[in-house]
Image: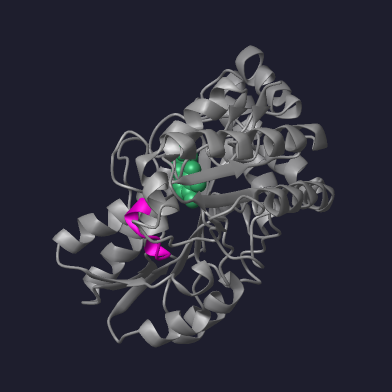
Amino acid sequence: MQVYADNAATTKISDAALRAMMPCFETYYGNPSSLHTVGQEAKEVLEDARARVAKCLGCEPREIYFTSGGSEADNQAILSAARLGQRKGKMHIISTAFEHHAVLHTLQKLEKEGFSVTYLDVTQNHNITAQQVKDALREDTCLVTVMFANNEIGSILPIAEIGAICKEAGIPFHTDAVQAVGHLAIDVKAMNIDMLSLSAHKFHGPKGVGALYCRRGFPLTNVIDGGAQERGKRAGTENLPGICGMVAALEEACTNLEANTAKITALRDKLIAGLSQIPHCDLNGDRVNRLPGNVSFCFEGIEGEALLLMLDMKGICASSGSACTSGSLDPSHVLLAIGRVHDVAHGSLRLSLSEYNTDEEIDHILTVVPQVVQTLRNMSPVWRDLMTGKREFIL
Ligand SMILES: *Cc1c(COP(=O)(O)O)cnc(C)c1O
């Protein structure tokens, strides 16, 4: 049995999304900037796609800018707010300690330029409160950038409340909603969001395409210079096949949102209940406000990397923290941010589900993971020290 449980890293493209891409290769292959018929037909497809994305988010078509994915949208949103702030002498940014690297690394670059960043603490409930944002606001705050939902541990942040606070204070609010779009109900106007990043491959769309929603009137700064595409704010010939695949996947996800949420949540809760039976483990992430598909645990006395390899041999594709973090020896910044000590953070496992997973697959995971954890613990010198009392259990 092959079980794909790494949907927070990327998802399988849906049939509808794949089918929607084909006409862009065969018929609508023109350059939307070309004045001839073939180009203008492609332009029509592009603008239709923009309107459909806007409808799913509750905004106007001209507030949607297509990008190469979530990372680019995050970079552009943050840099735009930073440049505007700089022009007004406001150089303070509020974010959280468990953002995606696309946000964190952009903020670190700005810190080197002289910006100061407040990273909100996420140890309480593995989440933040809107009050924390309110308390961190300063006269010189030029941006609040807070993710909609965390990619490693699944916590869903109080975005509507934060939006209301930012609106009242007149401070631009960006949210990295890459894990939320297609999985949670979103209305950018009702939630007072000024900028929002999304990425197609996290909701069964193609890779390498995403979008930035930017409230009308907010001045965007280019991160890619060149032609006048995307109303002059993002140069480069549009990735029309990707965009059409993304729209099809987004509409499918929004149409089936309730049914998918019910199904995936049930699978998630069964998995969490079963894995909680393993001794000396703890669930990562907010227990209540949690993405339907996220299961994240720390198991004491094992190495997450070894666990992943052994699960892979048993046909289970999972992840240990973020895919971007593996390949480095440092434990995930997210697990450290929620207060896990290094040893515990190293023993992490993330299983992220989609509507394509089945109850039989959950049963398979629940058979295999406890066995593999025990096998690894039996081989671990750390586990021996824990069992003989030479070292104290943390979990
Ligand atoms: C995947 C992800 C990104 C990056 O999106 P790409 O389209 O892969 O660049 C950014 N933020 C979060 C929360 C993500 O999960």
Q: Is 148 positioned to the left or the right of 344 in the image?
A: right
Q: Is residue 54 visible?
A: yes
Taking depth in this image into account, of 344 and 191 the one nearest to the observer is 344
Location of the N terminus (image quadrant): top right
Give the answer, above or below, for where 205 lies relative to 121. above
Q: Residue furthest right?
A: 259
**What's the magenta region?**
337-343
265 sits left or right of 380 in the view: right
Q: Position of residue 269 (x, y in %)?
A: 74, 53
Q: Is residue 14 left or right of residue 113?
A: right
Name the spot of residue 73 as percent of width and height, x first.
Answer: 43, 48
Residue 46, horizontal then vertical, whole percent: 61, 35
Q: Is residue 115 above or below residue 164?
A: above
Furthest residue to the front?
388
Q: On screen, 98 above or below 314?
A: below
Colour scheme: one colour
Give the tally of numbered discs: 0
Of all residues shown, which one is farthest toward the top? Answer: 26
Q: Nearer the viewer, residue 97 or 368?
A: 368
Q: Between residues 259 and 18, which one lies in front from this camera angle?
A: 259
Give the residue furthest to the left: 113
Q: Measuring 67% from the left and 22% from the top, which residue is drawn there?
A: 2
Q: Quadrant of residue 188?
A: bottom right
Image location of residue 213, percent across then percent down? 53, 55
Q: Does the magenta-highlighted stretch encompass residue 77?
A: no
Please indicate, yes or no, whether residue 69 appears anywhere in the rendered image: no
- The residue at the point 51 percent across, 35 percent down is 209
Question: Left or right of 86: which side holds 159?
Answer: right
